[in-house]
Amino acid sequence: MFASNKIIEEYWINLSINEKDIDYIYNLLLEKEIPLSTEILLKSLIDYRIKQEKENSAKQLRSKNNVYLPRDEFHVGDKLQFPSLEMKVGEVLNIRDGFNPDFENLKVIEVKFESGDSKVFASNIQEHPLNHILDIPEDDPNYDPALVYNHHKTYLSDCLETSLTNNEDLVKIAGNWFPRSLLIDVHVGHLNLAEAILEEANGGPIPTYSLMEQVELKANADSKLLEFSFDLALQEDKRFDEVGPSGETLWFLNAMEPDSVKKVPIYLKYRENNIDHLPIIKYLDLFEKNIYDELDEWDSHGDENNRIIISLSYPHWRSGTLPLSSTLEKMFPTAYEAPRVKFTFINEANNDQFPGWVVRQQKYVYGLKEWYQKNNLMPGSLVIVEKGKIPGEILIQFEKSRQNKEWIKTVLIGSDLAIVFAMLKQSIAANFNERMAIFVPNPDALDEIWDKNIYQKEPIEKTVLRIMRELSKLNPQGQVHAQELYASINVVRRCPPSLVLHQLLHAPTIEYLGDLYFKFEEKDK
Amino acid sequence: MPDANKKFSLVKPSVNTTFHIDFDWWQERDSNWRIFLVSFLCEKHQELFSDKDDSFIIDAVDPETAEIRPVDGVLHTLMNHCAKKDDFIPDNLPMIGRIFRIFLANGNKPLTPLQLSEMVNRPARTILVTIGGHQVYKGLRPIQAKAN
């Protein structure tokens, strides 16, 4: 077959950004004189690459290879490569006029190949499919900038981002890139003023343009460029954090951000265990539909109305957080870059507003500690979240329980910090998931277990067996439901549902009874 | 060159036997066969080839490799151009004439009496009796197995 150097799919899959690409982007930014997003730069780069490759392949093939195309005229002594003969090289020996009523000016060339064979070929004919062998088909998806962008944008964006980040001459702010050399210098005095203004506003958030007005930042330059320069100065100063959702640049004073936003609460810390998730998914699908855990790729799906009911786990209840699982992530505001996004919770019961924070990298939503306490919620309570009418607002509520008291699994802690579960009657405020519900009468005592890392230190297998043993005492059959075990283990250490199931399914002393129920084998009771 | 050793098949042809125009057979038996073929060329090509003798050669261009292959000018033009025209097979022709033109139009690809039956709207049996007997019309013959 004809070996061409056309762009094939692997070209885009294996693309690496080179110096020429960076030069191209740099020049583009200089020419446009405005900051441009990675998306725009990538689209432009794809366009540039396609044009370059088209020119290159045309040049290379025509000049170096001297490919035989029937439309060309040749001379005796010409050396040609023949696409139909796996690019064999042959020399033109003779030329004569041909006769064929279909091809008026047909010339016939006799070609001698390196192997000694001779063949005769047509030349000077315009209508022949071989004439187009070097052409790039118009419908080739690898030459269509829009299709290339759609098919490869994730990888190519990452690639470009990495290369641009490594380039010291370029800076990025709120998703836009610009040459550092064109930026306007922002005096430290303006930054000090910005700090004072944010402090006055309880930390913020305040949009860039408003801060610029208040610090009276002015320069004889394009206002967008000035805003971009100010954004960069704020970003490079550790006193300030950008906390705006996608499309908005809002600034907050780092010192005034809640500790649990800057630092992951102890209850949410997790040391990864590598397990094969594939065989576990079918069991995870049997979990009740209001279980969301940021540590698992598997997730409940929520409902189509963007109203999600979440069953609280102990770590999130104690931290005043919600899990930012893959389903919940879509509900809460996000950002291009800002690791923390500030938004507003609205209590549906009384329209009270209070701040919330999406901590993107660590996958949790902070800001509910007081709300949980005020409403007497407990681990297992069902919390309802819904998107507000205004972007950046999240409605939150719970369903009040009709019963005042219920038999609830209660955690009791011994003086040796060993834990025991007992079914006791407890006051309840909200509807709850029975398998997830755990009453914790003394959370401070439980904190000691977390502070001392008692369970975190030991292998997960051991924790699973210990908690399973305690739970199996709660019913005469000694059966334990996986979801119940998941909720209970999370009272003493952070653990995703998949890991609990993996341990249950692989423990030699535990027997699976079906429907997610497990029990110790008889001899191990 | 015609194969002098070619033998007739002794197997009696059926409606499923494939037939074609056996130009070799014709060449051996009728010295005017080319003049006969030229008469099938369209007006344009008859005029174009008027100054050539009836055995001229054309440089046929291979549609894939563009290699040149010398071919019989009349046959090539007839099969690739003139016989492709819509009016090449008039409805009112006798059966043999129609079958002959059908083979010219399809590039002399073998066909059985059954297949021809649909094309000429005559029973396959009738076609078989006509072109499968001892008398050979216009070179229409069963395909012969090559003699070893």
Image (cartoon, coloured by chain):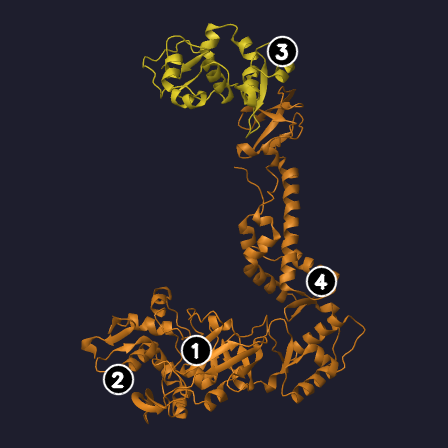
Please tell me if label 4 and label 1 are on a single chain: yes
Q: Left or right: where does residue A49 sit relative to residue A216?
A: left
First along the sequence among labels 4 and 1: 4
Please tell me which residue is depicted at 54% across the width and 9% down the height of the picture.
Answer: B36
SS at mark 2?
A: loop
Tint of chain B: yellow
Specify few, some or many for label 4: CA neighbours under 10 Å numbering under 14, 14-19, or 20 or more: some
Vertical comparison of A66 with A252: above or below: above
Tint of chain A: orange
Q: Position of residue A346 (x, y in %)?
A: 54, 83
Please tell me if label 3 and label 2 are on a single chain: no
Q: Left or right: where does residue A471 sit relative to residue A493?
A: left
Tell me the CA gap for discs 1 and 3: 93 Å
SS at mark 1?
A: strand
Mark 4 vs mark 3: in front: 3
Residue type beneath disc 1: Ile
Are the two marked residues, 3 and 2, in contact with CB atoms closer than 8 angstroms?
A: no
| Residue at the extreme left of the image, as rendered | A523
Tell me the CA gap for discs 3 and 2: 109 Å
Mark 1 vs mark 2: in front: 1
The answer for which chain carries disc 2 is A
Question: Which corner quadrant of the image does residue A430 belong to?
Answer: bottom left
Residue type beneath disc 3: Lys
SS at mark 4?
A: helix
Tell me the CA gap for discs 4 and 2: 68 Å
Q: Which residue is mark 4?
A: A29
Specify few, some or many for label 2: CA neighbours under 10 Å numbering under 14, 14-19, or 20 or more: some
Q: Which residue is mark 2?
A: A474
Q: Which residue is mark 3?
A: B52
First along the sequence among labels 1 and 2: 1
Tell me the CA gap for discs 1 and 2: 25 Å
